[in-house]
Image: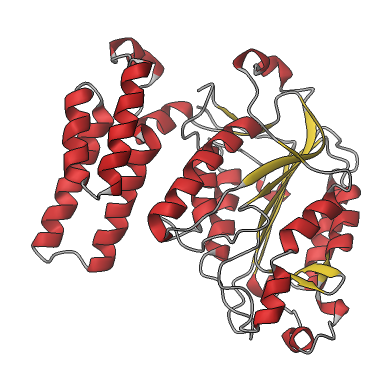
């Protein structure tokens, strides 16, 4: 794919770890924002103009800076209604009595624990919604990764109240009720619908009653963002046409995140993709380098497809059942041997088998640390489950 420039693409990405504050620190939020920013500006992927991607990290993400950045985004897109806008917030969210709010870096934690909230040091949900309503872009995607396991303080009654954050913010974003996005059938998904597409979509890292894991297979990003980056990069793309749409995101995240959460921490986490209003046409979020994505994931490129084996659906159902059984018993070597016998022409299985054997050798010889071994082991298992489970 040659270099692109998606002039209509705009983004505001906010990531706060709260280091140097009295707020419970998060592990991966700033890494998550940096990674998404890099992907959006990648000229072979989303190709958003760099001057239209704003990031606010740590000390930059103060109450006033966040509000100003939302105003700036509305101003930039005021005369450009055919724009696509992505807003990501990775940090804490809070609820105190009748106030639902995002937690900026300069949050007054003492006023919160005293239950006398300093409202000059929060981004209240009603302020956030008012700012969004001023953004007139035809396509708006709001990504909220803000209900992290562990919470924001050690005060139990406050954290119980915070469990309502996602439910309350969703209701404020859409008083008439959110409509969960379900993948459309193939015959409605064609590139002729790219231009007239409209809609406002909210993507949350978990359901309202759940918590988002701040760990992942790659140990660099949160579990949710790790999977989001994969699908935006073209992983498991439905059309394999070089574009990622809302249905690609919905299908991949709802499949991969719950499975990995169970494997990593025996934890329940289910991302939600829902429309706030007027979801019409094929809502394209970004492009991707189709050939590079297929090669890196071990899938066949279009020129290779005719030489690849076609798997029988009934046989694949049995394979999935057996793979799940092997993985549940941690019999990964047996699982890979079984897959190799059932799908001898599948290059990804051979690749995973080689990686598994190398990781086991490194562990048995004491070359790898326990953490390094476990990270690689989890990555291989996740890859098996993503493709064959």
- Residue 218 can be seen in this image: no
Q: Which quadrant of the rendered structure holds the C terminus?
A: top left
Residue 258, image x and y in percent?
50, 48
Looking at the picture, tell me which residue is in the foreground, 241 or 186: 186
Give the quadrant of residue 218: bottom left
Give the quadrant of residue 93: bottom right
- Residue 159 can be seen in this image: yes
Vertical side of 79 occupied by 192: above or below: above
> Residue at image x 55%, y 32%?
3
Vertical side of 244 occupied by 267: above or below: below
> Residue at image x 8%, y 62%?
365
Q: How is the image coloured?
A: secondary structure
Vertical side of 40 occupied by 146: above or below: below
Residue sticking out furthest to the left = 365
Looking at the picture, tell me which residue is in the foreground, 387 or 135: 387
> Residue at image x 58%, y 79%?
19
Vertical side of 86 occupied by 338: above or below: above
Looking at the picture, tell me which residue is in the foreground, 353 or 154: 154
Residue 227, image x and y in percent?
50, 46
Q: How many marks?
A: 0
Q: Is residue 126 left or right of 315 when viewed as pictured? A: right
Residue 324, image x and y in percent?
32, 39
Residue sticking out furthest to the top = 306
> Residue at image x 37%, y 34%?
387
Residue 89, image x and y in percent?
68, 59
């Amino acid at each position: 794919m040659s270099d692109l420039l998606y002039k209509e693409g705009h983004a505001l990405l906010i990531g706060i770890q709260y280091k140097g504050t009295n707020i419970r620190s998060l592990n991966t939020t700033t890494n998550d924002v940096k990674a998404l920013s890099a992907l959006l500006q990648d000229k072979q992927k989303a190709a958003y103009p760099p001057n239209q991607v704003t990031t606010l990290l740590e000390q930059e993400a103060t109450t006033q800076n966040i509000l100003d950045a939302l105003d700036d985004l509305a101003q930039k897109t005021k005369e450009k209604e055919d724009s696509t806008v992505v807003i990501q917030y990775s940090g804490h969210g809070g609820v105190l009595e009748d106030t639902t709010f995002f937690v900026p870096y300069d949050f007054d934690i003492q006023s919160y624990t005293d239950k006398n909230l300093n409202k000059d040091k929060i981004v209240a949900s009603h302020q956030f919604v008012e700012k969004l309503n001023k953004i007139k872009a035809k396509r708006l995607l709001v990504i909220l990764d803000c209900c992290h396991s562990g919470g924001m303080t050690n005060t139990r009654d406050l954290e119980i109240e915070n469990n309502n954050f996602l439910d309350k913010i969703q209701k404020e974003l859409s008083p008439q009720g959110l409509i969960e996005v379900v993948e459309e059938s193939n015959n409605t998904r064609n590139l002729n619908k790219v231009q007239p597409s409209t809609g406002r979509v909210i993507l949350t890292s978990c359901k309202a009653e759940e918590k988002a894991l701040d760990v992942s297979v790659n140990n660099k990003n949160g579990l949710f963002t790790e999977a989001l980056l994969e699908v935006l990069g073209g992983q498991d793309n439905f059309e394999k046409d070089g574009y990622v749409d809302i249905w690609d995101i919905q299908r991949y995240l709802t499949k991969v995140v719950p499975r990995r959460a169970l494997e990593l921490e025996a934890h329940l986490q289910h991302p939600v993709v829902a429309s706030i209003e007027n979801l019409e046409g094929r809502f394209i979020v970004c492009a991707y380098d189709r050939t590079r994505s297929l090669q890196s994931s071990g899938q066949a490129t279009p020129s290779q497809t005719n030489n690849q084996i076609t798997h029988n659906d009934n046989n694949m159902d049995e394979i999935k059942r057996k793979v799940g059984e092997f993985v549940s018993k941690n019999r990964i070597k047996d699982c890979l041997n079984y897959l190799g016998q059932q799908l001898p022409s599948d290059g990804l299985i051979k690749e995973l088998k080689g990686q598994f054997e190398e990781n086991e050798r490194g562990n048995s010889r004491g070359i790898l640390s326990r953490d390094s071994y476990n990270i690689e082991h989890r990555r291989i298992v996740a890859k098996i489950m993503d493709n064959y489970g």
